[in-house]
Amino acid sequence: MGCDWSRVSLTGHVGTGVSPVQASQLAPVLGGTKVAALCAAGQPRRLSPRGLWNLHGIVIPTGAERSERRGGTLCLAVPEQPPSCARPGRWDTCPYVGGGRLLIEGTIFMQRINLGDFELTAVSDGIYHLDGGGMFGVVPKSLWERKLPADARNLVPLGLNSVLVRTGSHTVLIETGVGNKLSEKMVKIYGQPAHLLQELNAAGIAPDDVDIVINTHLHFDHCGWNTVRQGDKIAATFPKAKYYVQEGEWKHAHEHQRDAVSYITENYDPLVQSGQMTLLRGDAEIVPGISVRVYPGHTRNMQAVLVQSGGQTACYISDLIPTSAHLDLNWVMSYDLYPIETIESRKRYYAQAVPEKWLTIFTHDASVPWAHVVEDDRGKMAVRA
C-alpha cells in the first residue's frame, strides 16, 4: 500500500503522530518556508526534553527556531507558547496539517494511498467543534482529554472527513460534510467551514466528475454537500452522481426522534424525490469493489463503506469509531442512539478488520484520516500507520 502527498512526488507515510514524516519527504513541500509544528487542535505534544515537536497537526508559518534530523524524522523547535494563529479551521491565517492534508501558502497537499488498483484521496469539509462530553459519553474527562484536548468551552476539534475513491471506472465520494446551507443559528453553534468543493478541485475533481456519492447516514455533518441552493431551489451538488443511503435511515430522519436536530431534509429529500438517491435495504454492493455494510449503534441503519481491491480492504467506518481516540469498545458517544449496539458492532468490526489488516478510515479525526487498527500487548486497540 503506497502513500504520498498529492501534487508532490513523495513516498512513505505522512505525519499523523503514528508514523512520522521523513525529512527528505518534506523538503520539496516546505522548501525554505519557516514553520513550527504542533499537534492537532493547537495542543502541542512534547517529544523530547529539548523542546522538539513532531510534524503533525497544525503547521504555523512563523516561530520555528531550527530544524534537525533525529532518526530520519524532521523535528522542529517551537516556542513554548504557540502563536495566536494556532486555531484549527482558520485556513485564512494559518496553514495546517489535519485529516491528511497540508496547506502551505494557499496550496493544498492531500494524503493519498493506493489500495490495489484503486486510489484513495483524503478530502475534507474542514474542522468543526462539538462538546467533548457529548463525544465521549460516560468516559471521564480526565481520561478522554489526554487523547483529544478540549478548549475553554469544553469543545473538541473534529474533522469533516470524506474520501475520494478512483477505481478506474468510477469516481466515488464517501460523505459530503456539513455543506453551506446551515441556518444562522447552526453556524454560530457548529461553524460552517465549507471546504469540500475547494479540496475536490485541488484533487482535480469537478462536481460533474463524481459518479457515486455514498452517505453513511443523514446527519447534517455527513451529507451537507449532497445539495446546494440555486436561487429558491435545491439542486444536486453532483448532478451526474447516483446517491446511496439506507432506506431505514431516511425513514428515521422523518420520525422526529431525539436526534431530529441533526437532520436537514434539504440534504436528501429532493434527491429521493427526483430518483437520484437510491434507498438501500441492508448490505449491498454499489459497484465492483465498493460495498456497504450496516453497523447499528450511532443510528439504527448507519452503514460503513468497504473499499476492496487487490486483496486489500479499507473501511470508512463512520460514527461507529468517529476518531482514533474512540478505539476502546466502551468509549461511546452520547450522541449514539443505541450505545449497547455500538459496542456489539465494534466487536463485530474488530473481529474481521484486525486480523485481516483493514485500513480504518475515521470520519471525524482532525489529524488522522486513516490507520490500521491493531491489538497491542495489553489487549487494547491501537492505531498503526
Image (cartoon, rainbow, N blue to C red):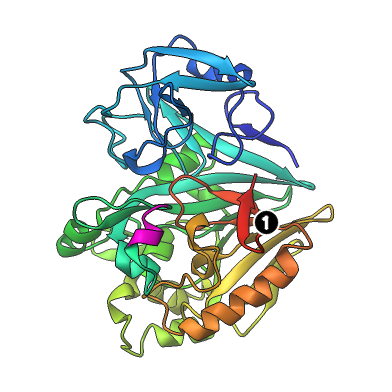
Q: Residue at x 19, y 51 (%)?
A: 152
Q: Nearer the viewer, residue 280 or 162?
A: 162
Task: Kindly report the secondary structure that dominates the magenta region of the rendered protein.
Answer: helix
Residue 21: quarter of image: top right
366 left or right, relative to 29: left
* Picture quarter with the C terminus: top right
Judged left or right of residue 141, residue 72 is: right
Q: Is residue 134 magenta?
A: no
Label 1: how many Cα within 10 Å (few below 14, some 14–19, many 20+): few
- State the residue at coordinates (21%, 63%): 186
Out of 367 and 261, give the one closest to the viewer.
367
Q: Residue at x 47, y 14 (%)?
A: 67
Quadrant of the frame with the N terminus: top right
Q: Residue 217 at x, y = what percent?
A: 48, 73
Can residue 227 be spotted in the picture? no
Instruction: Give me the residue at 57% from left, 38% from top.
Output: 111
In the rendered image, residue 174, in percent from the top left (x then y), is placed at 55, 59
Query: How far across and how far down the image is residue 34, in percent?
Result: 39, 14
The kind of residue on which mark 1 rests is Asp
From the viewer's perspective, is residue 127 above or below residue 232?
above
Q: Is residue 143 magenta?
A: yes
Report the front residue among 112 and 20: 20
**Residue tagged 1:** 376
Q: Nearer the viewer, residue 275 or 366?
A: 366
> What segment is highlighted magenta in the picture?
142-146
Q: Is residue 104 above or below residue 40?
A: above
Q: Is residue 248 above or below residue 366?
A: below
Residue ranking furthest to the top: 32
Q: Position of residue 342 (x, y in %)?
A: 53, 78
